[in-house]
């Protein structure tokens, strides 16, 4: 598959127009979306209009790196005049009156939006199978999940139905689907990209990030969408070129290998594949340093307490009064709220609201939420110590390859434990990028992650790119 840089050259040299490129992707969507379920909403007319404007911009010599590039958008990122459902019955007909900040930034670049992608309901899930609408399937094996919650965005890129896409990552929701679908996905440093217009799940954990066919492409997209936003007071003025370190040698770089990430629960093929990556870096001059994160055993518990507590607060606004789904013929205000929420939310969302409300209740706040916050502080201390010794950290992205469509749907504990390799980056807020590094005996992709200290995103991209340049990717035969 092509990269953004390759398509950019083709557009600038007039070998293809943005309209022709967009039409080719729309044809792929028509041919494959019924099978793969990547998109909830396809924006055919809007996409072709954007492509025409992009071609005019290119003709005038005003094109940027992303002008005319076809992109898919996760359906929890607000798009003015285009439905934003969050994969939920609750917002099934919601059309935002405004754009998210990242959409405004991409509009300025001249990006073409192909549509809004399928996702776990309100980004709550690890398989994208809790979506009220299309349930996306893995392009490498349609009997397997694509990962979640940004599964549709990963499937769109992996299945050739978009050149790149945006997702959101709360506990691994970009990186895990990227690993399962054999593409590259990045969660940038918390605060580097505005969350304004991203429908909130866990406000201290959520971060918008890209899916693409290379680490360089992820850096190009991040250069366009990052920066301070007056609408989001957690955003930061990121004065960095995410692609600045590409091509630089890794000789002398110290790469941390946290032993807890390679213990029980990690499939042998995954472990071996990731250790081969470590060996590659060592052979090319990097120094491998064994490090430790003893608090990792508490990571999933702490993450779900924090995320669900924030979700119970964020989702309280969906009451059937202001916007979203409203039950029919309620007899009272209490019944309106109760029935609207009961009918509008799916089982996984209800489960997390209940867990979060319980953790925040007066009798259990100290026992659960407060302790989870203490664990968060301990993670920050442990990772700060690691990055004093190391430049980056290498881990598996997920403990397994993609599993069967119905394998974990009735076992939430098993599904939650699958987040063990990704949640710490969100708890602490550091950048992390997932890159494919191999395939199991059934041909399913395996991914590894490179994480770095806060706002050292460019270094993570550099290290990922160094491996990618010699790795021969396989693509789904769709």
Image (spheres, rainbow, N blue to C red):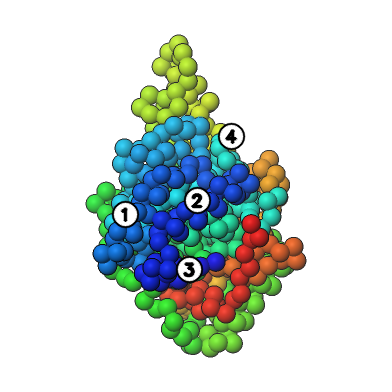
Helix, strand or loop for disc 2: helix
- Badge 1 crowding class, 10 Å Cα cut-off, few under 14, some 14 to 19, many 20 or more, is some
Q: Is residue 236 visible?
A: no
Residue linked to disc 3: 3
Q: Is residue 66 left or right of residue 74?
A: left
Question: Which badge, 3 or 2, comes first in the chain's sequence?
Answer: 3
Q: Residue furthest left?
A: 230
* Pair 3/4: label in front: 3
Identify whether 86 is placed above or below 243.
above
Q: What's the distance in space between the residues labelled 3 and 4, CA to CA? A: 39 Å
Question: Which badge, 2 or 4, comes first in the chain's sequence?
Answer: 2
Q: What's the distance in space between the residues labelled 1 and 4, CA to CA? A: 43 Å
- Badge 2 crowding class, 10 Å Cα cut-off, few under 14, some 14 to 19, many 20 or more, is many
Residue linked to disc 2: 26
Residue linked to disc 1: 53
Question: Which badge, 3 or 4, comes first in the chain's sequence?
Answer: 3
Tell me, yes or no, whether the two marked residues, 3 and 2, touch with CB atoms within 8 Å.
no
Helix, strand or loop for disc 1: helix
């Amino acid at each position: 598959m092509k990269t953004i840089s390759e398509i950019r050259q083709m557009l600038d040299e007039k070998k293809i127009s943005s309209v022709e490129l967009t039409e080719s992707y729309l044809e792929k969507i028509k041919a494959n979306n019924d099978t793969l379920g990547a998109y909830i909403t396809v924006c055919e007319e809007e996409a072709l209009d954007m492509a025409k404007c992009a071609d005019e911009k290119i003709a005038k010599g005003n094109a940027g790196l992303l002008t005319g590039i076809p992109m898919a958008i996760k359906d929890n990122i607000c798009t003015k005049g285009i439905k934003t459902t969050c994969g939920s019955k609750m917002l099934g007909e919601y059309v935002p009156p405004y754009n998210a900040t990242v959409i405004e930034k991409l509009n300025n670049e001249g990006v073409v939006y192909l549509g809004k992608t399928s996702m776990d309901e309100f980004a709550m899930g690890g398989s994208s199978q809790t979506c009220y609408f299309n349930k996306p399937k893995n392009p490498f094996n349609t009997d397997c999940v694509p990962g979640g919650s940004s599964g549709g965005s990963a499937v769109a890129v992996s299945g050739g139905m978009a050149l790149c896409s945006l997702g959101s990552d709360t506990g691994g929701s970009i990186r895990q689907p990227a690993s399962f679908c054999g593409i590259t996905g990045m969660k940038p440093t918390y605060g580097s990209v505005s969350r304004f217009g991203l429908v909130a799940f866990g406000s201290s954990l959520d971060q918008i990030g890209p899916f693409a066919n290379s680490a360089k492409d992820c850096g190009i997209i991040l250069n366009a969408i990052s920066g301070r936003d007056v609408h989001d007071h957690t955003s930061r003025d990121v004065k960095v070129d995410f692609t600045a370190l590409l091509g630089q040698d890794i000789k002398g770089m110290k790469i941390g290998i946290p032993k807890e990430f390679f213990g029980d629960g990690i499939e042998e093929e995954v472990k071996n594949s990731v250790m081969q990556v470590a060996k590659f870096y060592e052979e090319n001059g990097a120094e491998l340093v064994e490090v430790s994160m003893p608090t990792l055993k508490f990571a999933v518990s702490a993450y779900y307490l924090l995320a669900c507590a924030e979700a119970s607060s964020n989702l309280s606004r969906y009451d059937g009064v202001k916007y979203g789904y409203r039950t029919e013929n309620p007899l009272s205000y209490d019944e309106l709220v109760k029935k609207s929420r009961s009918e509008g939310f799916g089982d996984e969302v209800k489960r997390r609201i209940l867990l979060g409300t319980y953790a925040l209740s007066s009798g259990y706040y100290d026992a659960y939420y407060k302790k989870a916050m203490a664990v968060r502080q301990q993670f920050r201390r442990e990772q700060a110590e690691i990055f004093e010794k190391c430049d980056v950290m290498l881990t598996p992205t997920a403990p397994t390859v993609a599993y069967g469509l119905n394998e974990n749907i009735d076992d939430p504990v098993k599904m939650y434990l699958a987040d063990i390799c990704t949640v710490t980056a969100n708890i602490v807020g550091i950048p992390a990028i997932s890159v494919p590094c191999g395939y199991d005996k059934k041909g399913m992709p395996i991914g590894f992650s490179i994480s770095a200290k806060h706002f050292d995103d460019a270094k993570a991209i550099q290290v990922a790119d160094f491996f990618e340049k010699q790795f021969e990717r396989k693509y789904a035969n769709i």
